[in-house]
Amino acid sequence: MRKLRLIFSILTVVFASLGLAKILSYDISLPLMFVSMILTFLVWSKECYDKGSKRDSYIFLGVAIFIAAITVFNIISNFSSKENNTGIQNGETVQMYSQEEINSAIEVIKKEFEKDWNGCTLKEIHYAGDKVSKEHQEFAERYNADEVIVLVSTFDVDESGGDGSLNSNSTYTDWNWILVRKNGGKWKHVDHGY
């Protein structure tokens, strides 16, 4: 029983680490971590019961049931939120894209910004909303894609004026970034500005 408890404890740590390191998505790593944790507590409960310590056995059993209830609730919540993939982000309706899809588009812009926008500091970037993305659908046709996503950002410009086309020592707000993709592939930045 002790070996079994050790195995489940190690699995709990492994799945938690995989989630934190973003090797596995939280949707997968968290339930697996909690299942391993539940099994650990159940083994502890059995060990205590076998040793005649029924009070401790019931405590461990209670903890296992509590974690199981939270895990089931989380799985059902995640499932229903994906089924009705509608939400509000920064006051805008989000139905077209999952948070993961939005985050991957944001990462494209963050990398490009860091590489190409010298003298500028990105302060904030988020999804512009379904309405704005639909209004820019012509970019999909123009770039032989089938999906468009629009992000909106705020950034500071230092005394250099960035590449010279921006106002020096200023802050740009509501700056749009337009990205397209085909067949659910990688996002490609195709345009930006007001």
Image (cartoon, helix red, strand yellow):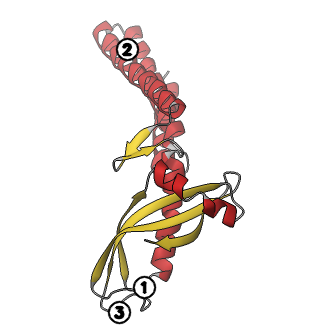
User: For residue 70, which quarter of the picture?
Assistant: top left
Classify mark 3: helix, strand or loop: loop
**CB atoms of marks 2 and 1 within 8 Å:** no
Q: Amino acid at mark 1?
A: Asn
Give residue 61's mark: 2
Q: Residues within 10 Å of mark 3 (few under 14, many from 20)?
A: some
Residue at image coords 50%, 36%? 85
Q: Earlier in the sequence, mark 2 or mark 3?
A: 2
Give the label, 2 or 3, closer to the camera.
3
Q: Residues within 10 Å of mark 1 (few under 14, many from 20)?
A: some
Q: CA distance from mark 2 to mark 3?
A: 64 Å
Rendering coords of residue 163 (x, y %): 44, 89
User: For residue 65, which quarter of the picture?
Assistant: top left
Classify mark 1: helix, strand or loop: loop
Q: CA distance from mark 3 to mark 1?
A: 9 Å
**CB atoms of marks 3 and 1 within 8 Å:** yes
Q: Indicate the quadrant containing the C terminus: top left, top right, bottom left or bottom right.
A: bottom left
Residue at image coords 35%, 76%? 121
The residue to which callout 1 is attached is 118
In the rendered structure, the answer to whether residue 168 lies left or right of residue 83 reads left
Residue 171 seen by the camera: yes
User: For residue 128, which quarter of the picture?
Assistant: bottom left
The residue to which callout 3 is attached is 160
Residue at image coords 69%, 59%? 145
